[in-house]
Image (tube, helix red, strand yellow):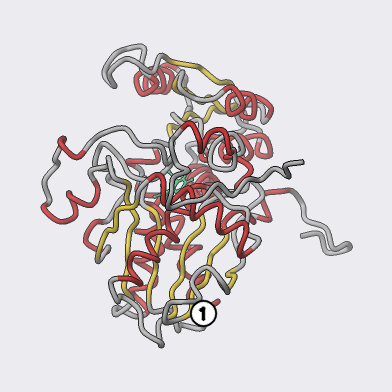
Amino acid sequence: MREDLQVFDNVLQLIGNTPLIQLNRITQEYQGEFFAKVEAFNPGHSTKDRIALYIIEEAEKKGILKPGDTIIETTSGNTGFSIAMVSIIKGYECILAVSSKSSKDKIDMLRSMGAKVYVCPANVTADDPRSYYQVAKRMHDEIKGSVYINQYFNELNIEAHYKTTGPEIWKQTEGKITHLVACSGTGGTISGTAKYLKEQNPSIRVIGIDAYGSVLKKYHETKEFDAAEIYPYRIEGLGKNLIPTATDFDIIDQFVKVTDEESAHTARQLAKTEGLFVGYTSGAAVQGVKQLAEEGEFDKNSKVVVIFPDHGSRYMSKVFSDDWMTEQGFFDSKHEKTSNRIEF
Ligand code: PMP
């Protein structure tokens, strides 16, 4: 902040310190109080701003990054956007290797933020030299002074949330939080936040949200990788077909699996009941809360914090499109079509 005016030096100063907002309607039939940590208030509209800034600043502190150097990652999603944003401000080249499955909108968005985007074939295995993993690795080897963020296997992903998200929630709830509910993708959000919170109060329950089609819940329960758990699903950013080292499985008490369909309806319901236009995984997290409440997880003293990872605008052609919902077969007798359009 400048001292002579009430002006931020640049957009990066707005990262973190996101609000905790009470849920008043969607959870009203359940015992306890429910609060959303709404990460869409970050300037890049997602929780990934925190890790992009933290990992890049740690590399600067260690002298690994100098102005003009290159930052590399394999993502078309929120992390790519956040890295591109931080790179622009700090004067780094940003290279993102993405899968050809990524939508044109997403690729255009990353290029608009100054990133160099390499589109790699989706239908090859991870060890194929054309895959986005191998392309990123090769560029990291070839470009001197480059940093590979590698969010699924980077301990600093956990540390970013340990240093920021955890302390913020502890302060915002005045230490009264009883449950943390968070989606698990890389696992950085849940692991880092939980680590800080459990150090303050070890009895806080930590619950991870996983997708049907992902291996995380089964791995947590058996410590074995079960490939039979893996099949395609729609929710983006949640669950995984490998075991990320950015997940501290020991700190998570329980995983809950949610479906694509229920999570999509819950995301739409959040907009219509709470006025919160948030992403697909925010819907997934609240869907998990509903299932936990039905199982009797909460009582009248519960203070449940649910992390909402990103903004709804990234899902206009998916969850918030009636056509997409219809194509998926998500409108059925249980879920009436609640059209966003006014029919004349
Ligand atoms: N929701 C969305 C939309 C995401 O992009 C991610 C990140 N993959 C997550 C949830 C999960 O967060 P994390 O990677 O920290 O587990």
Query: For this rendering, which residue is in front, 317 or 324?
Result: 324
Secondary element at tag 1: loop
- Name the quadrant of the C terminus: top right
Q: Is residue 149 above or below residue 212?
A: above
- Name the quadrant of the N terminus: bottom right
- Residue 152 percent across, percent down from the top left: 35, 41
Q: Which residue is mark 1?
A: 173
- Residue 126 percent across, percent down from the top left: 29, 22
Q: Quadrant of residue 302?
A: bottom left
Q: How many numbered badges does the structure rendering display?
A: 1
Q: Residue at x 41, y 87 (%)?
A: 300
Query: For this rendering, which residue is in front, 132 or 334?
Result: 334
Instruction: Judge from the rendering whether residue 178 lies leftward or rightward of residue 316; answer left or right.
Output: left
Q: Amino acid at mark 1?
A: Thr
Instruction: Judge from the rendering whether residue 289 lies leftward or rightward of residue 326; answer left or right.
Output: left
Q: Is residue 297 above or below residue 108?
A: below
Q: How many neighbours does mark 1 have within 10 angstroms: few (below 14), some (14-19), or many (20 or more)?
A: some
Q: Residue at x 83, y 58 (%)?
A: 7
- Residue 110 percent across, percent down from the top left: 61, 29
Q: Is residue 323 above or below residue 220?
A: above
Question: Disc 1 beta carbon < 8 A from ligand 1?
Answer: no
- Residue 177 percent across, percent down from the top left: 43, 79
Q: Residue at x 53, y 66 (%)?
A: 36
Q: Quadrant of residue 273?
A: bottom right
Q: Residue at x 58, y 29 (%)?
A: 106
